[in-house]
Image (spheres, helix red, strand yellow):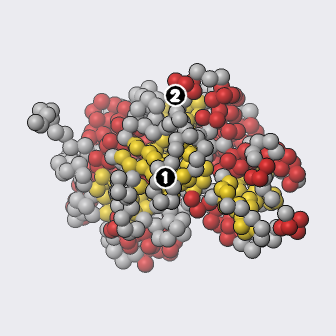
Amino acid sequence: MQGLMQDWPLTVDRILDHGASWHGGREVVTRAIEGGIVRTTYGQIHARAKKLSNALLEHGIRPGDRVATLAFNTYRHIEAWYGVMGMGAVCHTLNPRLFAEQLVYIINHAEDRILLADSSTAPILQGILPQCPKIEKVIWLTSDTHVPAGLPGVSYESFIAGQSEVCAWGGFPESQAAGLCYTSGTTGNPKGVLYSHRSNYLHTMMSLQADVQGLSAADNVLMVVPMFHANAWGLAFSAPAVGAKLVLPGSQMDGAAILELLETEQVSVSAAVPTVFQMLLQHLEKTGAQLPYLKKVLIGGSACPESIIRSFRDKYDVEVLHLWGMTEMSPVGSVGVPCATVAALPYDEQMPYRLKQGRAPLGVDMKLTDDDGKLLPQDGQTFGRLKVRGHSVARAYFKGEGGDILDADGYFDTGDVATLDALGYMQITDRAKDVIKSGGEWISSIEIENIAAGHPKAALAAVVGLVHPKWDERPLLIVQLKPGETATKEEFLHFLDGKIAKWWMPNDVVFDTIPLGATGKIDKKLIRQKFDGYHWPEAVAAE
Ligand code: ADP
């Protein structure tokens, strides 16, 4: 027997419709790419996004066509998301920090017809546009005065000028594609994750659970996580869904720029990868500034070191929520919110749990298996392959790249190695490709680098496994010191002593700059390339 409730397709245009209807005056504040602060509202964004839909329709864009963006977080980028998705086309977010060859591959693979780009990306586009013959039009996300000279295209403002603010959104099945985002392709070519309206809508509902993002209408949210990275962690949907004020940093993510927005916009919640908050904390230390409005930060994308969690809480009374997820999961997979048992512990005893990546919210199933797919125990010790399934998890990549990606029970292999404990807390020990295999045992690079990053002189720390004549691989610790600091190898080894197993101790420490990849994470592939053929000190090689 069928239920008798209304069947309402779960399409994301309803989210901005709701934001405009019930929170229409709520502000969206942008640090503009051209400089200065721009204030707009959900009501204005809704009207302008409809104008964009009409302009795209007039150009001949139809449902299912791919419209790309190459842009940082701004109000025009938000309009582009809704204007494209609302009319049933697919919004393809491109990461401006990718290498030119990767962008060319992705644009051509996706068959993008239109490209909406920040004017600051002109130098990138100049090189790649001739190699992307399917792009029919470039629309610069700016006004006429800032359109880059010498390149094709029109300004966004002139493109939408004169269009009607009335345009029918939705009306298509909820299973229709809404967004496309390629994973960074650390192995093989980048692969496209094709979000549906339904997966994004349900991901929004999931994110709004109190134990996930838990946003409210009274929050002011600084969305540092870029819209081109993993669906902006769902915040571009969840903020208008509840009527939270949205603050957008444009392309400036340094400590001073972030602090200014936190203060002037009285931001209560922010979200970014650990390196962004590391820069903010260093800036706060230097200037002595405080964070009177900020209550909560969502940190994910790579493991959050203890030093960040403690600094936020002890010095600024800010709660850190540690999240894990991936592009293929829309992206939220788990959140480290204390459960009743953990919350009852003294703060120091909560720390081992806060450092874990957390528990699965409603909508995500997780399991650990060995390489043969055999289920592993949930004892907090046994490492295994982490596999997931859920309504917002990919079931295939765009155009079938990578073939069949699910196991017989519908689980997707995340490529992460993790443990699961009796309380349901998952902890990532490594990406499968970063695990250090020493004498047949596994060493977690993440755990060592998180402790090393807590050394007062360290700005960043990375650990990679390098070939060793006796043990197959041994860990090398690379430390980027804070500006003006000097340190010795012994200082860092002494700092790690007693905090990690003796046989995990790095065999050498190198002081160097640490490269960050296109999503602000430490780029271990580059580090491994750089240290390829590295000669361990003689004594170490003989150990
Ligand atoms: P990429 O980093 O490849 O560009 P994603 O943003 O989708 O693409 O990265 C997802 C991966 O990032 C996860 O599979 C995991 O390895 C890592 N990751 C994400 N959040 C965390 C976290 N809190 N702790 C450790 N690793 C994380």
Camera-side residue: 448 or 299? Answer: 448
Reading the image, the residue beneath label 1 is 369
- Vertical arrangement, residue 249 with respect to residue 106, above or below: above
Q: Please tell me whether mark 1 sits on a helix, a strand or a loop.
A: strand
Residue drawn at x 10%, y 36% as measured from the top left = 1
- Vertical arrangement, residue 166 with respect to residue 4, above or below: below
- Vertical arrangement, residue 398 with respect to residue 160, above or below: below
Q: Quadrant of residue 528?
A: bottom right
Camera-side residue: 238 or 258? Answer: 238
Please state the horizontal and vertical placement of residue 198, each as a whole percent of the image. Answer: 28, 47
- Vertical arrangement, residue 77 with respect to residue 131, above or below: above
Please state the horizontal and vertical placement of residue 41, each as a whole percent of the image. Answer: 38, 37
Camera-side residue: 194 or 503? Answer: 503
Number of numbered discs: 2
The amino acid type of the residue labelled 1 equals Thr
Please state the horizontal and vertical placement of residue 250, each as a whole percent of the image. Answer: 51, 49
Gap between marks 2 and 1, in whole Å? 25 Å
Residue drawn at x 47%, y 60% as measured from the top left = 372
Residue drawn at x 31%, y 58% as measured from the top left = 90
Q: Is residue 508 visible?
A: yes
Please state the horizontal and vertical placement of residue 209, each as a whole percent of the image. Answer: 41, 32
Reading the image, the residue beneath label 2 is 339
Q: Is residue 158 visible?
A: no
The amino acid type of the residue labelled 2 equals Cys
